[in-house]
């Protein structure tokens, strides 16, 4: 499994778990990691956010 597949899976899981609040959860996590100075963590969660944005723009999941 590639890193991209893992991040895509994370985005899907977060949407299924948190619904409309998923983007908020991701933004909160990015903020936490930024406050801790975790640049790698911020980059990973920004990638997850990008996948989530693509999924949400595509329409409802089935």
Image: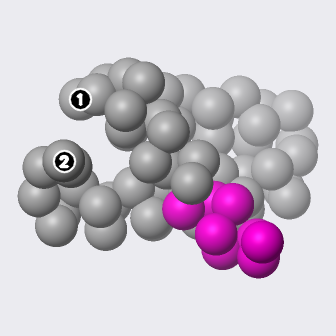
Q: Secondary structure at mark 1?
A: helix
Which of 1 and 29 lies nearest the eye of the viewer? 1
Within 10 Å of the Cα at label 2, are there few (<14), some (14-19), or many (20+) other Cα atoms? few
Q: Is residue 7 above or below residue 11?
A: below
Quadrant, the N terminus: bottom right
Residue under label 1: 20
> Mark 2, mark 1: which one is toward the viewer?
2
Q: Residue shown at 28%/28% (left/top)?
A: 19
Judging depth in this view, the residue of 11 and 45 nearest the camera is 11
Q: Is residue 40 left or right of residue 45?
A: right
Query: From what the image shows, is residue 25 above or below residue 55?
Result: above
Tell me the magenta residue range: 1-8
Q: Is residue 4 magenta?
A: yes
Based on the picture, tell me whether residue 37 belongs to the magenta stretch. no
Q: Residue at x 17, y 63 (%)?
A: 57
Mark 2 and mark 1: span between their CA atoms? 15 Å
Task: Name the dominant secondary structure of the magenta segment.
Answer: helix
| Residue 53, numbered label | none
Residue 16 found in image quarter:
top left
Q: Secondary structure at mark 2?
A: loop
What residue sits right under mark 2 in the picture?
Answer: 62
Q: What residue lies at 76% left-to-right and 76% top-to-bottom?
A: 2
Q: Residue furthest front?
A: 62
Residue 49: percent from left, percent from top: 48, 55
Q: Which of these two is toward me, 14 or 45?
A: 14
């Amino acid at each position: 499994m590639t890193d991209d597949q893992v991040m895509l899976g994370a985005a899907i899981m977060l949407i299924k778990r948190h619904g409309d609040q998923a983007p908020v959860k991701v933004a909160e996590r990015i903020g936490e990691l930024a406050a801790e100075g975790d640049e790698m963590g911020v980059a990973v969660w920004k990638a997850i956010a990008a996948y989530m944005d693509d999924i949400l723009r595509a329409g409802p999941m089935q």
